[in-house]
Structure formats: C-alpha cells, structure tokens
Amino acid sequence: MSAMNHIASNTNVCFRLRTNQSNYIKFKKYTAAGLGFSGGTSQLGRCAICQEGQEVKLSAVTDRVVRHELCHALGLLHEQAREDRDNFVDILTNNIKPGFENQFAQAIFTSTDIGTYDFSSIMHYYSTAFGKIVNGVTLQTIRRKSNAADVNFGNNNVLSAGDRFGINSMYPFEQVCANITPLAPGELGIGQSKTVTVSANKTFNLTGIYMRSGQRFQYSTTSPAWNNGNKTTDCNGYAGSILDATRRHGDITVMALTGEIFLQNNSDNYTGTYFKIGCSRTLTGTRTGFLVCFANDIFVAYGDNSGSVSLTVTRTL
Ligand SMILES: [Zn+2]
C-alpha cells in the first residue's frame, strides 16, 4: 500500500482496493528460492487473459522492488530495454548468470521509448543485476558507456522525473485519489457484505462490522420475521409497506434502515463509538466505529420482542 500510495501521489494514476473488477492485481509472496531470485516479477501492463487477477510475485518486499513491479504492471519496461540503450550502456553478456540472459533483451518493436535515457529510473537495473558469482563476487553486467567507473546506478527507490513522465504519458488524465489504507479488522471493502443475525431479545448485537466516517451501507434481509407487529410505529425507512392482517408489513426483503454513529456507554460496560441502526435514526457519518444492532429498537417498533432476523450489511461507498 505504501508503494501504491507513492506512485499515486507522484503520477496521474490511482490505486484502489479491488471490489468486483474483472482486471486486477494481486500480490503473492514467495521465498527467494521459490521465485528463483530475490526481487519480484509482474505482468507487463494489463493482463487481459489473466482469469483471477494478475499476480505481482514478491520474494523481497522493499520500497524499490514493490514500486518497480507495480510500474511493470502499469506498463513500464526496464530502462535498459530501450531501443537506444546501446548508446548509453554495454551489456556484459559473459557475466550474466546462465538462464537470465533474456532479462537484458531490448524491446524495440513492442514498446516505445519515452523521454531520454534515465540512469535514475526505478526501472533501471543495478550494475551487477543477474551477474555470475565468482569467488564470492558478483560480476558486473551493465557498464555505463560515458563513465565505466560509475557503478552506482539502478539503486533508486523512488520514481524519477523520467518515470513520472513515462507513466503520465500512458495515463494522461490526472486522477485525484486518497491514500489506500489497510482495512481495519471487521471493515468491509466497497461492495463487500457481511450477514449477521440480530436477535430481538438482546439489547444489542455486536456485529463486528467496522465503519468509518464517509462510508455508506445498505441493509437487507430475507427474513420475514418483522411481520407480526401490532403496534403503530413511526419507524422510518421500512420498505415492506404492504399492510395486511397477518403480515403487518409483508415480507420485508429490503430495509432502508438508517442509523447514526454515536458514543455509547451502557450498563453492560460496553463503551466506545458505535454505529447504531434502528428506527428514526439518521446517519450523521461524522464518526467511526462498530456497527451495533439495537434489536429492541427494531423489533419493539414492530411489537415483537422474540424473533431474530438475518441482516446483510453491504458497503456501498
Ligand atoms: Zn523488473
């Protein structure tokens, strides 16, 4: 997330947590032995045929590695793969570890050089990348033409000006986005839902759904348990408005319950900031907390203090 936020804050690109998008990136951690080296791999750009997300494989989780791999996923190749690279570097082919020669291939017909050759690019290999190890020394594989003694390149762990220019050339429209933050325990991603059981004979049910200010939720149920009330109510927002003798509000399949986040301190030593749903409540959205279903609020309004309902909470924003 730190790597995504670094790229997002320096380019036009935004990263968002996936909900139900068909094309997306997923991160998979490997051992160096499992991946074959210490570092990472990524698809180049969007992988149209990846069925269940395209993997960014990581055997090292450093700023440089993760940012570098994300840049591959955005469409950047290695700097030394440029068409004009032979004007700037020599590839010391004999020093490359056997099997890794293709890491130094140029992409002449399949990609476009953007900007000028950039030794400070986060996409530039370091001078001994994939070098043979001889007597404990890793041999140099990339030599700078203008200054053979300079082996101090390919170590950048932030996007260079050239990297930013390259990414923005591919993604020319600025997207304004907030930093990605990890989901808290119990927090739903957008589009995700959780189904909880709310019992009428409890003052509240702690559902364990964490809610933040600004997020929006929809509540639905297929339980026809709120149908035997005999009490007039001013409960706002119920969707089952068909009244009949046996099913006061019909089978309620979608509720439009509203709620508010408030500070609660009750007799069960249950203190903190919670989101409460029930009748005649409005979502103020100014606080953060856990969803607490105050079942009595719901059931008493319908004259039933014995049943329970299955409540599905879906985060919509
Ligand atoms: Zn790479």
Image: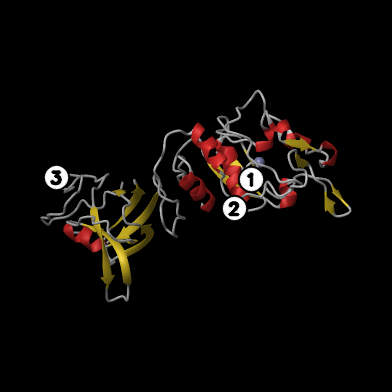
Q: Give the left or right position of residue 44, taking residue 214 as reference.
A: right
Seen from this angle, which residue lies furthest top? Answer: 109
Q: Which residue is mark 3?
A: 243
Per the rendering, the mark at residue 250 is none
The residue nearer to you, when weighing 118 against 270, is 118
Q: Residue at x 45, y 55 (%)?
A: 183
Q: Residue at x 83, y 46 (%)?
A: 132
Q: Residue at x 44, y 59 (%)?
A: 184
- The 10 Å Cα crowd at callout 3, few under 14, some 14 to 19, many 20 or more, is few
- The 10 Å Cα crowd at callout 1, few under 14, some 14 to 19, many 20 or more, is many
Seen from this angle, which residue lies furthest left? Answer: 232
Residue 220 position, x and y percent, is 30, 47
Q: Which residue is mark 1?
A: 57
Residue 114 position, x and y percent, is 58, 31
Question: Can you see residue 233?
Answer: yes
Spatial CA span between label 1 and label 2: 14 Å
Amino acid, disc 1: Lys
In primary-sequence order, the first of circles 3 and 1 is 1
Assess whether mark 3 and mark 2 are in contact (beta carbons under 8 angstroms). Answer: no
- The 10 Å Cα crowd at callout 2, few under 14, some 14 to 19, many 20 or more, is some
In primary-sequence order, the first of circles 1 and 2 is 1
Q: Give the left or right position of residue 138, taking residue 24 as reference.
A: right
Q: Is residue 298 above or below residue 125?
A: below
The residue nearer to you, when weighing 166 against 179, is 166
Residue 21 position, x and y percent, is 46, 37
In primary-sequence order, the first of circles 2 and 3 is 2
Assess whether mark 1 and mark 3 are in contact (beta carbons under 8 angstroms). Answer: no
Helix, strand or loop at disc 2? helix
The residue nearer to you, when weighing 165 against 48, is 165
Q: Which residue is mark 2?
A: 63
